[in-house]
């Protein structure tokens, strides 16, 4: 039996303790990610009706500077997209649209940071727990083979301890999956709200351009 085989056998016969330790570390990391993402999302809440009630008249009047100042004073992520477009108003519609799309992409990357860890943990923690259960059962049968008599109760106790790993794996996975889905929904909501602001700005840009086209011939006629 080579060294590698002996090492793997010793790890296997060591039971599920190291798997439980790994799951404990992953659960701590998972809680840390959940709290950090909660601070990011709930620290930048967006009151859509109140903000739209103030910014819409400014956009309608083409008071771009006042609208930009309002966006910069807001803590919400959604207003960053509108602010990016307002900063490029003098460049016309293509520049405004590209600026807002780029900012929306940056915002999406920011909001989705570390969510992949929660999704991966939620998908694989049960399998890690199952691995611990299998190792625990192997250890229990090894104890049964070494026992001279009355090994049945010891084996049952060992199997019961091994099943703890599966339970811990599920306890780690379920909150991770729930919070991953919750935060992913929040990301989608923020990006869709920012899209509403983008279309609002583009609509008023087009309205302003159409008004300029309609007034130009009238002014020319007045000079004649």
Image (cartoon, grey):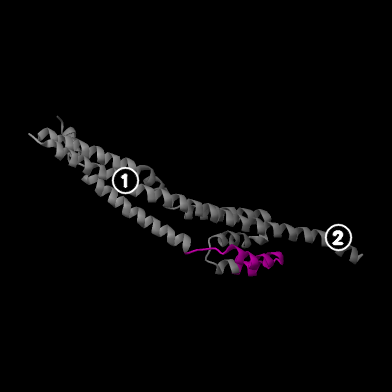
Question: Tag 1: Cα neighbours inside 10 Å, few (<14), some, or many (≥20)?
Answer: many
Q: Which residues are magenta?
A: 43-69
Residue 7 appears in the figure:
no
The number of callouts visible is 2
As helix, strand or loop, the secondary structure at mark 1 comes to: helix
Q: Quadrant of residue 138?
A: top left
**Does the stretch in magenta take in 47?**
yes
Residue 17: where, in percent of width, then height? 21, 46
Residue 158 appears in the figure:
yes
Gap in Å between the C-alphas at discs 1 and 2? Answer: 73 Å
Residue at 78% in and 61% down: 212
Which comes before the other along the chain, label 1 or label 2?
A: 1
Which mark, residue 169? 1
Residue furthest top in the image: 1
As helix, strand or loop, the secondary structure at mark 2 comes to: helix
In the displayed structure image, the side of residue 135 where residue 149 appears, left or right: left
Q: Which mark is nearer the camera, 1 or 2?
A: 1
In the displayed structure image, the side of residue 78 where residue 178 appears, left or right: left
Vertical side of 131 occupied by 57: above or below: below
> Viewer-proximal residue, 180 or 174?
174
Residue at 62% in and 56% down: 196
Residue furthest right in the image: 224
In the displayed structure image, the side of residue 62 where residue 112 appears, left or right: left
Residue at 86% in and 60% down: 217
**Does the stretch in magenta take in 17?**
no
Which mark, residue 217? 2
> Viewer-proximal residue, 158 or 186?
158
Task: Considering the whole magenta stretch, tell me its main secondary structure.
Answer: helix
């Amino acid at each position: 039996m080579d060294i590698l085989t002996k090492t793997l056998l010793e790890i296997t016969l060591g039971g599920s303790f190291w798997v439980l330790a790994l799951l404990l570390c992953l659960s701590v990391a998972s809680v840390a990610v959940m709290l950090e993402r909660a601070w990011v999302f709930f620290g930048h809440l967006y009151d859509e009706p109140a903000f739209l009630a103030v910014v819409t008249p400014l956009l309608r009047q083409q008071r771009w500077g006042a609208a930009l100042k309002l966006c910069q004073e807001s803590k919400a992520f959604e207003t960053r997209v509108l602010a990016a477009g307002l900063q490029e108003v003098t460049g016309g519609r293509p520049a405004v649209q590209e600026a807002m799309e780029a900012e929306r992409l940056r915002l999406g990357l920011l909001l989705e940071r570390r969510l992949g860890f929660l999704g991966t943990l939620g998908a694989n923690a049960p399998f890690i727990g199952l691995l611990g259960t299998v190792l625990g059962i192997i250890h229990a049968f090894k104890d049964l083979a070494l026992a001279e008599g009355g090994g049945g109760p010891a084996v049952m106790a060992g199997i019961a301890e091994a099943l703890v790993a599966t339970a811990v794996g599920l306890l780690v996975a379920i909150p991770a999956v729930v919070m991953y889905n919750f935060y992913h929904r929040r990301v989608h909501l923020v990006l869709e709200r920012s899209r509403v602001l983008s279309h609002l700005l583009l609509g008023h840009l087009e309205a302003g351009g159409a008004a300029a086209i309609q007034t130009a011939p009238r002014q020319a006629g007045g000079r004649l």
